[in-house]
Each structure stands twice: as C-alpha cells, then as structure tokens.
Image: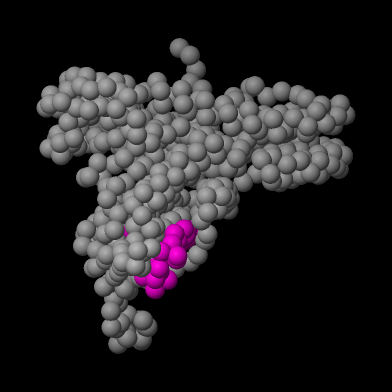
Amino acid sequence: MAKKQKTAISPTRAEDYPEWYQQVVRAAELAETSAVRGCMVIRPWGYGVWENIRDGLDGMFKATGHKNAYFPLFIPLSFLEKEAEHVEGFAKECAVVTHHRLEAGPDGGLVPAGELEEPLVVRPTSETIIGATYAKWIQSYRDLPILINQWANVVRWEMRTRLFLRTAEFLWQEGHTAHETREEAWDETLTILDVYKTFAEEYMAVPVLTGEKTAGERFPGADNTFCIEAMMQDRKALQAGTSHFLGQSFAKASNIQYQSREGEVEYAWTTSWGVSTRLIGGLIMVHADDNGMVIPPRLAPSHVAILPIYRKEEEREGVLAFCETLAEQLRAVTYRGRPLGVELDTRDMNAGEKGWSWVKKGIPLTVEVGPRDMAAGSVYVGRRDQERNERYGQPKDEFVAAVPDLLEAIQASLLARARTFMEAHTRDIEAWDDFVAFFTPANADKPEVHGGFAMAHWCDGEACEQKINDELKVTIRCIPTDRAASGEGACIVCGQPSSGRVAFAKSY
C-alpha cells in the first residue's frame, strides 16, 4: 500500500473542503476571527493582497474616467425607505444606530442614552446617501456624467459567516455614476463589467463567465444586474463582481433631476457596481493547494523570499552578507511597474520550517542560499506553482535578470491551470435526470466534491428557476452575454422553448 503523502494543510481539499479553506486562511496568516462576532481581522499579509487588488482596480477605474470620493458611513433610515425594493432587499441585514452616547447604569455598567431623532443605518451600500448628494450636485445636463468610486467598509449583519467570503463587516469599492441618457448608463454598466472580467483574468489569474442575473437574483431596485462568476476548486460558483444598471428608479427616489438640452426637467440615469474582500476568498479557493496559499504574482504582497541556510555560526555572517546583496539586487528590479517585493527571512528557526512557512503563505518564489550556493555564486529556486521537489539551482545574477519573466510565467500558468479546471467541469446538459445526477453527491451525509457549471436550456420562467433551487440548491449564476450563440432548445425543467443556455451551479 502506497504511503500517504504528507501535506502542510490538514485536512486536504478532498477530505474536507470547508475546513481546508479555514486552515489555509490561518496557515497563510491572511486573516483571523475577531472579538466582534462575525467580523474579521485582516492580517498584514492578507491586507497586502487587498492593497494590490485595490491599487490594480483603482488604476483601471481612473483610466476609464472615474474619480474617488468618500461618503458617510451612516445613512438616515428615511433615505432607505425612499426606494421600497431596495430597503426590502437589505432590511434583514441592517445594523442600526439609535443612540449617540453612553451613561452609567444603575448596576455600574454603561447603557445607551441620547436617543437619536432618526435612526441611522450603518452603510450596507450607498446608493441612497450618494443619491441625495447627487441631487444637490446635478442641476443641468452640463453637470453630467458624474463618475465616482469610493473605497470603504460596509456592514451587512450576516448570521453565518466565513472569513473573506461572508462577514458582517467587509471592505469593498462601490462605484456610483449618473448619466444624461439611458444609452450612456447602459454603456457604463457594461464597461465596468469588462473591467472586472479583465481584472479577474489578468491580475487574479481567475477565468470567469460574464452575463446577466435573473430577476430573482438581481440587486434590489436595479433594472438589470450583470456579474462575473468564477469556479472554485470544489466546483461551486463565486459571484466575484457585479455591475448594476439602475435605470431611473434611484434617481426618482432621490430626486436626481437635471435640465435637459431642450430645457425640459428630466431624471438622471444611474449605475452602481462593486467588488469586495470576497475576492481574496476567491483567490484562495481557485489557486491554493494542500500545502497552503498560492498567490498570483501581480497580487502578491512580496514576490521573493530569501532564505539564508547555515548550520555553523561561523557560516552565518558570509551567508547573510550574500543574501543582503541579493536582496538589494532584486529590489532594484521592477515587475509590472513596481519594485520587486523581497523578504529576507533571518528568523532563528529550522530551515525546513522557515521554507514551509513561505510555501503556506503562497509567495511566488523562494530562494535558498547556503554556504555551497554562496561559494558557487548561485541560488536554489522554488516556484510556488510547482512542487517542492522541482526546485533548481541557478547562478545568482542569471536568476536576478530572469525574475520578471519568471513571475510572468507563474502568472500565466495559474490562469491556464484554473481555466483548464473550469472547462473540465463545465458541461452542456440536455436531460433533467442528467442534470439532477450532476448536482447530487454520492454521499449525502458528507458530500464529496461534485457538480460544476451546467450549461442548460431554460424557458425564462420563474417557476422552473425556483424548482431547481428548491430541489437541488442550484441557482442560475448568469445568463451568458453570448447566450444566443448556444442555439435554441428545450427547458431542462418543463421542456418549453428556450432561446439559449444559461449557467447553473451551486454557489457561495
């Protein structure tokens, strides 16, 4: 009987995927639970990933004409009440401030005092508060378009939480734009959808499906919601970004009016769009393995970890000096417009333990240097997208010169691997029995990894959509933007005519 290979993360993905995820977050030092129920502490390594997500997207937003601003964390309750569908959609998740000070209670503790005239909702999303501001800013068609984004935190009082994927407080960006015409707002919605797709694939190395949400999955109050959907390694879908065409409903609720070119008073057309720290959860579930995190180079907080290795104290000084020179050389190199991030690990600990700590954190490259390497002017290189036994020796200067191309190769290999996985688990399905089998685990008590993206026909009927959700816990992730190209067929549920396939999956 073959000996079971030991992994740095236990349990493995195959043994217990949800627990594997939690262990990767912990081992990679990305985040941890906090003293506040449902909230997380994002640790420096995890926050470094978020900073690179933020900076990459921020540059793309600015390149398309958007500017950053900041709006209040607190939203008057009456603002939410103006858009009925919107408030209904968020009512169960709202945290509400009702008092503005604390006073000593009769038992010596503190009790709320100073009741507010109007309760304030802690920002679950900002359409209404930003809409009230835009109503003041916009008087004429000359004031349009307004293209604004904000980086902020939001609160949605989730009862079942999981680090990065679903927490009561999380970080995000939310774009809010106002336009003169429907066509301009529609184009904005699709432009941002393309920005998100490009970012997911080029920065995150995560292939995605793009399309529109059904009415049942639409953002509350929006006319249309578009999304990018990624496949995780347990074959579930993750909604990784959304772009909403709001039509004029929020403009009417917030009274965002302008004088048109013809002198008439018109309501503006608005959009909103956002991604969050949920993207880090997606990175973990797409790229991490049974040895820990794997971070695409374009998002890595640091690119190279240098590991000095010596057994005797008299070797220490020479090895460290060699490593410091190497670090200086690497920091002078740029990758994708920024200096290489280099970690020189001088911790007093076992060399193997030190190496595995960086493997678990997912740094793209590790470089080991011992006395023999130093004497030969070489380094011992490990790529995180390859197995540990594939490490190789290389002359130091040759390695330094090759690092940008090496990082590009890692970035490309991660995208190719994720794309191959998604394609392998995406199936066209015609019959209901095959559809049920695709989404039914063999072991109901402890479900194994199963399912994926089922591309199947749908009649556009709400009853068929609900039946699939009720019986299989499967939802329509998106109506693909190229749906018509899949051809006409018969609905997977009722057999009625379908204009094309849609993407079904279990999801987070």
Q: Position of residue 101 (x, y in %)?
A: 37, 83
From where the camera sits, is residue 339 visible?
A: yes
Q: At 34% across and 67% down in the image, what residue appears?
A: 263
Q: Nearer the viewer, residue 210 or 146?
A: 146
Q: Is residue 331 left or right of residue 215?
A: right
Q: Which residues are magenta?
A: 134-156
Badge count: 0
Q: What residue is rendered at 30% in x and 87% in y?
A: 106
Judged from this view, the residue extending furthest toward the front is 262
Q: Is residue 228 left or right of residue 378?
A: left
Q: Quadrant of residue 330?
A: top right
**Residue 110 image offset from top left, x and y in percent:** 35, 81
Residue 251 belongs to the span the image colors magenta: no
The picture places residue 5, in percent across and down from the top left corner, at: 51, 22
- Could you say which quadrant of the image residue 270 lies in? bottom left
**Is residue 149 within the magenta segment?**
yes
Residue 48 drawn at (x, y percent): 58, 50
The residue sitting at 34% across, 30% down in the picture is 482
Viewer-closest of 191 and 156: 191
- Please, is residue 95 above or below residue 301 in the view? below
In the image, is 223 to the left or to the right of 200? left
**Residue nearer the viewer, 132 or 423:** 132
